[in-house]
Image (spheres, helix red, strand yellow):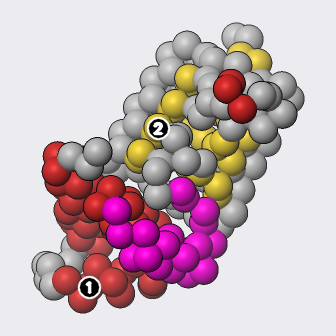
């Protein structure tokens, strides 16, 4: 069942992301056309804008428009974000090339995600055990990291480059290696 509050929440996130980038770029104009131009010319804004538009149409049941925004994001920004994924406020993709975010992934607020990262399910498990990761607020996900399965990465954690994370970690963790383990001090 579609809740109007879900759609409004995604629209609020678009406005928040837009205002964040407008302030960052010191632009005064807030014309709707600029959002489209930004989504194509500035990938760090476009990734979230196009994903949120795709999610809004997905929640409304308009699969064609949802797919259109998904494909526009996929081909213009080279990022694969399922419209069902939930992404919080002010998530930053400095280099969005090659990022894959699965269907039921939950990403908190103020998360930095670098290129070639994957957030998905462990397809080797049986269908009843499918689960997607939860990334809590203020995390940093390094280049090439793979976060797989029904796991949680705690607040203010750092996932190192090329780490393969298949287990949950508490807040303030520094995760490195294959498979992911906490960095000892």
Quarter-wise, where is residue 157 in the image?
Answer: top right
Badge 2: residue crowd in 10 Å (few <14, some 14–19, many ≥20): some
Mark 1 and mark 2 lie on one chain; the one further toward the N terminus is 1
Front residue (pair 61, 176): 61
Quarter of the image for the C terminus: give it: top right
Direction from residue 170 to residue 148 in the image, left or right? right
Direction from residue 184 to residue 85 in the image, left or right? left
The stretch drawn in magenta includes residue 63: yes
* Residue located at (52% from left, 30% from top): 134
Give me the C-alpha separation between circle 1 and circle 2: 28 Å
Report the residue marked by disc 2. Answer: 106
Q: What secondary structure predominates along the stretch shown in magenta?
A: helix
* Residue located at (66% from left, 42% from top): 120
Report the residue marked by disc 1. Answer: 34
Q: Is mark 1 on a helix, strand or loop?
A: helix
Vertically, is 57 above or below 167?
below
Front residue (pair 7, 166): 7
Badge 1: residue crowd in 10 Å (few <14, some 14–19, many ≥20): few
Residue 57: image location, x then y, percent: 33, 66
Front residue (pair 38, 22): 38
Q: What element carries label 2?
A: strand
* Residue located at (62% from left, 26% from top): 150
**Number of the label disc, if any, that sits on residue 137:** none
Q: What stretch is highlighted in magenta?
A: 61-82
Residue depth check, mark 1 versus mark 2: number of the one nearer the observer: 2
Residue 177: image location, x then y, percent: 82, 28
Vertically, is 45 above or below 162?
below
* Residue located at (23% from left, 54% from top): 7
Residue 101: image location, x then y, percent: 59, 51
């Amino acid at each position: 069942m579609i809740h109007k509050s879900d759609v409004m929440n995604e629209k609020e996130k678009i406005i928040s992301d837009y205002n964040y980038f407008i302030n960052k770029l010191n632009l005064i104009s807030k014309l709707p056309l600029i959002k489209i131009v930004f989504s194509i010319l500035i990938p760090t804004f476009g990734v979230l804008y196009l994903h949120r538009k795709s999610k809004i149409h997905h929640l409304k049941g308009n699969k064609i428009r949802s797919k259109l925004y998904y494909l526009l994001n996929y081909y213009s920004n080279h990022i694969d974000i399922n419209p069902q994924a939930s992404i919080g406020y002010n998530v930053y993709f400095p280099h969005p090339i090659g990022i894959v975010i699965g269907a039921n992934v939950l990403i908190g607020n103020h998360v930095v995600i670098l290129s070639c990262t994957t957030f998905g399910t462990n397809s080797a498990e049986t269908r009843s055990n499918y689960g997607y990761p939860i990334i809590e607020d203020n995390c940093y996900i390094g280049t090439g990291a793979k976060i797989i399965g029904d796991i949680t990465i705690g607040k203010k954690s750092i996932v190192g480059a090329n780490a393969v994370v298949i287990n949950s970690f508490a807040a303030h963790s520094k995760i490195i290696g294959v498979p992911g383990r906490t960095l000892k001090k």
